[in-house]
Amino acid sequence: MAIALRSFPAYKYPGKVLLADHPNAQLPRVGPVRAVASTNKMSSSSSKVLALGALVFSFLVTYGSCARPVNFTASDFTADPNWEAARATWYGAPNGAGPDDDGGACGFKNVNLPPFSAMTSCGNQPLFKDGKGCGSCYQIRCVNNAACSGNPETVIITDMNYYPVAKYHFDLSGTAFGAMAKPGRNDELRHAGIIDIQFKRVPCNYPGRKVTFHVEEGSNPVYLAVLVEFEDGDGDVVQVDLMEANSGYWTPMRESWGSIWRLDSNHRLQAPFSLRVTNESGRKLVANRVIPANWAPNNYYRSIIQKKHIEKLLQGHKVRAMREFRMEKEIFCKLVDVLCDNNLLTNNRVVSAEERLAMFLFCLSTNASNRSIRKRFQHSGETISRYFNLVLDAIVSLSPRIYSCLLSTPRYINLAIPSSCLTLSSIFFLHCADCIGAIDGTHVPITISTGLQDPYRNRKGGLSQNVMVACDFNGQFVHVSAGWEGSAADARVLLDALAHGFSVPAGKYYLVDAGYANTLNFIAPYRNVRYHLQEQDRSNQRPNNAKELFNLRHA
């Protein structure tokens, strides 16, 4: 396994190299070189060189570094079954994160920013574990020093300590080291050099953060490298597997270095990709389709494996998803793919495409308030409002690709008219051979401002829109007329639909209920005669006359 070594802060001068660990060092930085002194140009007995050597040695002992060889024997600790003994040093700026850029040998990005917030540490092999310890969280507290507060602080392993001074050696950032001090005594503790500490492994907790997959620079259709960040719980990653689109099986990825995993393929990889992360404890987390079909290198993709509500919905019982989305889980996932493939929906470091669509559908299907969605999905009201409108725009822009006609208004949807939907084998064929479907209206409950409510109040007193739907005998919609006020009569909605493209082929007709006029193209049942199947069932008797028989067949 190849592990990329961290670029230590080395500064080269003619004949020598300085380790710029002193807080006041402001020298220009050179590239990823080891701190190895060159002797070919040093004078044989220069007092300046000797003084410089003494100064460097003093810095090594006092300030600590991930690449600092020091031998030191551990002192005794007060016995505590929950804590283990270790030693700690620090490096970098007093209030810095060590390397403020790449997180060292683990490859994490911007460790000086939240959620790392510079509370980072290099770990020797028992902590770093050849990179599999990257992202592990530990509580530490210092002892045996008057400046120690004794309070535990949580740090994250982000780098390798190549020269330990004890069995367990934490080489901390200046910020993490100073955090163990009593108020106002940070510098005093930092000047103590190597100190005794106690430590214990703790679960990682990234509130408001989701597992992030960063596609590394250089990834291409046959090579994919991914950095895994912000994994709650264990924090570490011991295995990552990838599933290509429609493949149905997992392909193991190889640890490239630190927390970066790669897959070298002999064929073009088919996105979107699902990733499965395995922790040291054996827990497996699956991020379905987390990297979309239009992925690009040097981009972050947020998973859904820590969005607890989404995880339960997509991995739980299908009825629960149907209640919240009003669609099957498979349809939901396919809709996410379609929106992402058309660049209408994207992932970011805050809200994934799945969660955006889930919030949108939950609002539509349950008439949920912003407050209810905030409670359910744990996002701010502003975030929910913003992404609701983004998904709404995405759905509207996708509609011309779904419907076969060019819509002049969003109210009328006309699809292919069936020539006949009844076959010779149908028991209704002899009497209804020219029937091509049925028409009915439904009232969809709505919420609307007080000043606009009157036209939308239906005959039962509720607020609704009257939606008329025509379908064939295969259950396929052939026309939808939506948007009419709840007070509008069914017959009025039908007349408006006929004026906006809905038509009936010559010699054919639709079945309608008693709310519509009885014409050659629209056959209604007899009025004031038992009609609905519930009424027929309650009567518990056969039809008494031709009208009742007709209504029974009509229903």
Image (spheres, rainbow, N blue to C red):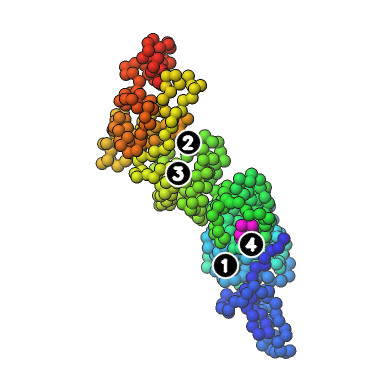
Marks 2 and 3, the one that precedes in the sequence: 2
Q: Which image quarter: residue 214?
A: bottom right
Task: Give the residue at mark 2.
Answer: 323
Q: Nearer the viewer, mark 4 or mark 2?
A: 2
Relative to residue 489, is residue 140 drawn left or right?
right
Q: Residue at x 43, y 42 (%)?
A: 404
Marks 4 and 3, the one that precedes in the sequence: 4
Instruction: Classify mark 4: helix, strand or loop.
Output: helix
- Check disc 4 and give the amino acid type: Cys
Q: Which mark is residue 403?
A: none
Marks 4 and 1, the one that precedes in the sequence: 1
Point out residue 321 in the picture as x, y percentages from the top left corner: 51, 38
Q: Read off the magenta span.
A: 219-226
Quick check: marks 1 and 3 in contact, CB under 8 Å?
no
Between the residue at mark 1 and the residue at mark 2, the CA separation in whole angstroms equals: 46 Å
Q: Residue at x 67, y 57 (%)?
A: 264
